[in-house]
Image: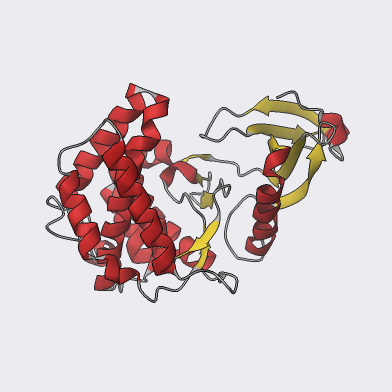
């Protein structure tokens, strides 16, 4: 993708443009520095993604009104003779949370996780638009698709039958679930820690609407790095009053996600397949082969017990 940066307003003031090689999307991302030292993030997508990117930009403007650290929207439009669509955002200065967390103290890990839970709760304040299909109808279709795709692919992992059994036994929990804005990929890989130990959230390109608790389906990546960070995220979201139903639903969402991860990984090769199979085995251990619904890594009231 050759980008005609000159078509983007004020690009004449950019004196540094660096490609950012991170993430799984086909978009091109660039780190920008302007002549006055302002740092920006430029995302460029094929024009076929225009409506999707416009929806994301509009939602970013809604999020801009919340008291959370995110990349702020600056500009949106087409470039490269209308072959591409661009989104220009502020850049969050800091380091990837997944590289910072291992160097922190246990209490720092927990507190940072607690803060990510509070941020997620604020994101979920934005309601879903009227006219959405019921969550039960939407997610049951997704479950059916995930099970069908898993069963038809050539790679299986031991214990998957226990996950499928748990999911089918707990589908009733999807009834009457309210829907809100979702980040869509909320985990440690999309978080930045600033030099002042604040947490910033990036990559809203999978933003959607649905059950807010589904956002915990990728907490597996957080728990892989730190059980205290993951526990803090749950406790922060619920202000230390976590309902039992949440854990039952989180197990369902994580289980469904593990099934879908195997067909997803196959086109990317054996390395990614191994990553997903290993994670599935970890998840099965956390849940005693899905004989329980509270993961072994979860810690309740950590801050209170260590104050």
Q: Give the residue drawn at x 49%, y 53%.
A: 184
Q: In the displayed structure, does residue 169 sit left or right of residue 27?
A: left
Relative to residue 3, is residue 66 depicted above or below?
below
Expressed as whole percent of the image width and height from the top left, the position of residue 173 reads 30, 70
Depth check, front residue: 58 or 270:
270
Quadrant assignment for the C terminus: bottom left
* Residue occupying image coordinates x 36% and y 61%: 140
Task: Indicate the position of residue 42 as horizontal and vertical percent values.
Answer: 70, 38
Q: Quadrant of the N terminus?
A: top right
- Residue placed most toward the observer, 149 or 174: 149
**Total label count?**
0
Q: Is residue 114 at least partly visible in the picture?
A: no
Residue 192, x across and y down, in percent: 51, 44
Q: How is the image coloured?
A: secondary structure
Vertical relation: 142 (above or below) 270: below
Residue 98 image-quadrant placement: top left
| Residue under the point 30% across and 48% down | 147
Q: Is residue 216 above or below residue 239?
A: above
What residue lies at 30% left-to-right and 34% top-to-bottom? 153
**In the orientation shown, which residue stands out farthest toward the bottom?**
176
- Horizontal side of residue 303 vs 137, given as left or right: left
Horizontal arrangement in the rendering, residue 153 relative to residue 118 (left or right): left
Q: Is residue 101 visible?
A: yes
Estimate the x, y position of residue 209 in percent, counting from the top left: 52, 62
């Amino acid at each position: 993708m050759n980008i005609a940066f000159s078509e983007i307003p004020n690009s004449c003031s950019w004196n540094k443009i660096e490609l950012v090689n991170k993430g799984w999307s086909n978009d091109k991302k660039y780190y920008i520095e302007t002549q006055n030292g302002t740092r920006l993030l430029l995302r460029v997508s094929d024009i076929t993604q225009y409506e999707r990117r416009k929806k994301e930009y509009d939602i970013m403007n809604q999020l801009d009104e919340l008291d959370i650290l995110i990349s702020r929207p600056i500009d949106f439009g087409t470039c490269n003779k209308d072959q591409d669509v661009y989104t220009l955002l502020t850049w969050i200065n800091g380091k990837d949370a997944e590289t910072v967390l291992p160097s922190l103290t246990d209490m720092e890990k927990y507190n940072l996780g607690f803060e990510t839970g509070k941020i997620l709760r604020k994101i979920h304040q934005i309601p879903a638009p009227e006219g959405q299909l019921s969550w039960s109808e939407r997610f049951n279709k997704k479950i059916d698709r995930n099970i069908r795709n898993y069963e038809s692919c050539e790679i299986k992992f031991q214990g998957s039958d226990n996950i499928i059994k748990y999911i089918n036994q707990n589908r009733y929990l999807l009834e009457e679930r309210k829907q809100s804005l979702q980040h869509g990929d909320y985990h440690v890989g999309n978080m930045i820690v600033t030099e002042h130990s604040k947490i910033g959230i990036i990559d809203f390109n999978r933003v959607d609407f649905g059950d807010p608790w589904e956002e915990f389906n990728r907490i597996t990546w957080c728990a892989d790095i730190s059980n205290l960070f993951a526990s803090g995220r749950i406790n922060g979201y619920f202000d230390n009053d976590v309902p039992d139903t949440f854990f039952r639903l989180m197990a369902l969402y994580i289980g469904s996600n593990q099934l879908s991860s195997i067909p997803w990984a196959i086109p990317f090769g054996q390395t990614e397949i191994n990553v997903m199979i290993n994670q599935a085995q970890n998840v099965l251990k956390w849940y005693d082969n899905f004989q329980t619904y509270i993961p072994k890594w979860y810690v309740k009231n950590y801050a209170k017990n260590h104050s």
